[in-house]
Amino acid sequence: MVANARQALFGKLTHNGTEAVIEKTPIGWALINQQRRLMELCPEIKILADKVMPDHHHMVLQVQLTMPRSIRQVVRGYMQGCKEEARKLGYVENLYDAPPFYCVLTHKGQLHAMIEYVKANTERAWQRRQNPDLFRMHRKTEVCGLQFTSMGNHFLLDWPERQLVEMSREASKGHLRTITTRPPRIYTFSAASRHRTREAV
């Protein structure tokens, strides 16, 4: 759920010396209070993870019992409650930019991955702020005497143990599994070219 015009209405991204944290605004705390209200009104729902960010917020919801209303209706009611609380705090504009993005998790491992993604949102945003170049396209990245276009954590390229792996885009799942299940001391750094993907490992 994204704040109107991506304004930092819900909080401020900071670091307490140990981890990245969000210092919530009164509106940000109102979102948390509305989550409690949501669970009171809809006992069929369990909130597995949530994260209030400066300009958006996430919730991972689990429907445990059949509900008289759809999940979209429930979330719409939650957002309406947040808007009403924001008006009480003096914010008279529309609190949200657009309807929320829904993602129904149906495959094995998706739920765990989504929960971990939401939990790591604050730290990921802090790292992006501290190292903006890690999340931009890099031209002429050089590894092992080769230059290519890349994007990712370039600090990994300073690791002393590297091997060059050339892999076709048409590689089978078995081939990919072989590469991604190597010992933890080896990492992969991918860079896409027109015909092949080169990885510094």
Image (cartoon, helix red, strand yellow):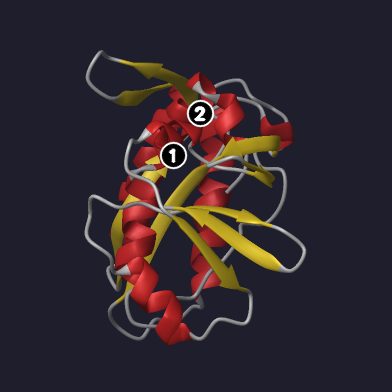
> What residue do we see at 25% from left, 13% from top?
17
Pick whichever of labels 2 and 1 is earlier in the sequence.
Answer: 2
Q: Mark 1 sits on what residue?
A: 31
Q: Circle 2 — which element?
A: loop
Q: Can residue 45 be seen?
A: yes
Q: Can residue 106 be seen?
A: no
Q: Are marks 2 and 1 in contact (CB under 8 Å)?
A: yes
What is the three-letter code of the residue carrying label 2?
Phe
What is the three-letter code of the residue carrying label 1?
Leu
Identify which residue, 154 or 60, lies in the foreground: 154
> What residue do we see at 73% from left, 31% from top?
93
- Does residue 44 lie above or below 189 as drawn? below
Q: Can you give x and y, in whole percent of width and height, for residue 91 in the image? A: 64, 24
> What residue do we see at 55% from left, 33% from top?
134
- Does residue 92 lie above or below 40 as drawn? above
Q: Can you give x and y, in whole percent of width and height, for residue 140 in the image? A: 71, 36
Q: Residue furthest top?
A: 17
